[in-house]
């Protein structure tokens, strides 16, 4: 009886631990995306060059200039490109463009876990990265 209760406790703790690790990985990814987008804006202003932020769906990578962030497979990614007709079909779509004058243009980039998550957008006038909560039914 004692061994059965111990096994049950270990199983429950293992499941809870895995959920904790997944939640922590999601939260870290959101912080990393936010940081990478802010850094892209600062690089654009400092270098006096536009910085493109691209999404590479096959590699699950968000590229901001020469910086790359891999999004974990366990997370769902939704995105809307800056311009659906921009570039050729083989190129990675541009999600955001940070201008040297501090402004920005862009679509949306969202990271979700279990149907809920965070959506990133940029303010066109000030170039600030804005986050909002998003929930996807389904």
Image (cartoon, rainbow, N blue to C red):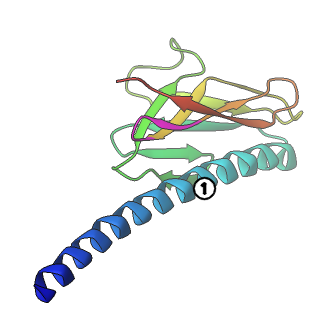
Q: Is residue 46 above or below residue 118?
A: below
Determine which quarter of the picture holds residue 86.
Answer: top right
Q: Position of residue 103 (x, y in %)?
A: 84, 29
Residue 30 in view: yes
Q: Residue at position x 51%, y 44% from top?
A: 62
Q: Position of residue 67 (x, y in %)?
A: 59, 54
Q: Residue at position x 54%, y 36% from top?
A: 54
Task: Please identify the dominant SS of the magenta region.
Answer: strand
Over which residues does the magenta segment extend? 113-118
Q: Which is nearer the eye, 45 or 134? A: 134
Q: Position of residue 75 (x, y in %)?
A: 40, 45
Q: Position of residue 109 (x, y in %)?
A: 56, 32
Residue behind mark 1: 32
Q: Is residue 43 above or below residue 104?
A: below
Determine which quarter of the picture holds residue 82.
Answer: top right
* Quadrant where the image shows the N terminus: bottom left
Q: Residue at position x 34%, y 50% from top?
A: 74
Q: Residue at position x 59%, y 27% from top?
A: 108
Q: Which residue is at the far front?
A: 1
Determine which quarter of the picture holds residue 81.
Answer: top right
Q: Is residue 36 above or below residue 110?
A: below
Residue 50 in view: no
**In the shown orientation, is residue 36 left or right of residue 99?**
left
**In the shown orientation, is residue 98 left or right of residue 110?**
right
* Quadrant where the image shows the C terminus: top left
Magenta stretch containing residue 117, yes or no?
Answer: yes
Magenta stretch containing residue 21, yes or no?
Answer: no
Q: Is residue 11 above or below residue 59?
A: below
Neighbour class for label 1 at 10 Å: few (<14), some, many (≥20)? Answer: some
Q: Which is nearer the eye, 27 or 105? A: 27
Disc 1, SS: helix
**In the shown orientation, is residue 105 left or right of residue 136?**
right
């Amino acid at each position: 009886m004692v061994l059965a209760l111990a096994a049950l406790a270990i199983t429950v703790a293992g499941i809870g631990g895995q959920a904790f690790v997944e939640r922590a990985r999601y939260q870290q990814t959101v912080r990393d995306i936010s940081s990478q987008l802010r850094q892209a804006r600062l690089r654009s202003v400092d270098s006096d060059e536009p910085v493109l932020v691209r999404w590479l769906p096959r590699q699950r990578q968000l590229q901001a200039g020469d910086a790359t962030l891999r999004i974990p497979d366990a997370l769902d990614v939704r995105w809307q490109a800056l311009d659906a007709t921009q570039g050729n079909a083989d190129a990675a779509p541009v999600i955001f463009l940070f201008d040297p004058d501090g402004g920005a243009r862009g679509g949306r980039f969202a990271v979700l876990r279990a149907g809920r998550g965070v959506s990133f957008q940029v303010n066109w006038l000030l170039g600030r990265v804005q986050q909002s909560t998003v929930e996807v039914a389904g």
